[in-house]
Amino acid sequence: MKNWKILSKKNILDSKWLRVDKEVCQLPNCKVISDFYTLWQPDWVLILAKNFQGKWVLASQYRHGTQKTSLEFPAGIIDSGETPIDAAKRELQEECAYAKGNWTLIGELPMNPDRHRGRFFVVYAEGVEKFQETRFDDSENIETVLIETEVLLEKIKEGIFVHPHQIAGFYLWQLKQS
């Protein structure tokens, strides 16, 4: 497979949370796509954390994209200079007030290989415990929920736990356990 050749690029939007570029691309068969849009979002980390009792630490929070409250694993943007594990530790403490434990980087996945240039990292933490208080960002209002693996699997089957990146990260973790 040959890569597409970018003939030109024009930035349409550039903000802290999203960048959109319009690209003119030449395909290997010499056809030209004059309006291929690519998206960039900051790299982020997905935190699969279990407490000493083996329960998953989840976050219940409003998501404006779906305009619904969503049950999810904690997650967040990786700040400049942070490793994925450092970001995971910070985000889990900020969002759910859990810390400590044993931490492992499970993998790195693209957000959407079709047109996104960002990626997310899956981090697993075992034996985390409640520590200090939450420190929410201005847009956050999160309730921490603890559930067993069987309940999480049921919520995925029932369409209650629906974040596709998070489901992929969870199943990647499961595959690495075998």
Image: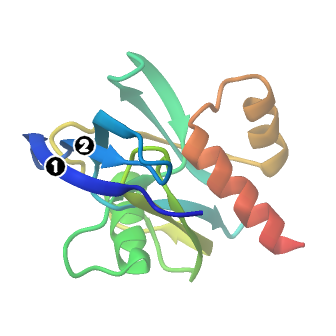
Determine the image quadrant of residue 163.
top right
Q: CA distance from mark 2 to mark 1?
A: 6 Å
Quadrant where the N terminus sits is bottom right
Q: Position of residue 102 (x, y in %)?
A: 59, 83
Q: Residue at x 15, y 41 (%)?
A: 138
Q: Residue at x 64, y 32 (%)?
A: 161
Q: Residue at x 32, y 23 (%)?
A: 64
Q: Position of residue 141 (x, y in %)?
A: 30, 35
Q: Position of residue 110 (x, y in %)?
A: 49, 58
Name the amino acid, label 2.
Val
Label 2, on which residue? Answer: 24
Q: Is residue 4 left or right of residue 153?
A: left
Residue 54 seen = no
Which residue occupies the foreground of this view, 69 or 37?
37
* Contact, mark 2 vs mark 1 (Cβ under 8 Å): yes
Q: Is residue 9 left or right of residue 173?
A: left
Label 1: element kind = strand
Label 1, on which residue? Answer: 9
Label 2: element kind = strand
Query: Which of marks 1 and 2 precedes in the sequence?
Result: 1
Quadrant where the C terminus sits is bottom right
Residue 76 seen = yes
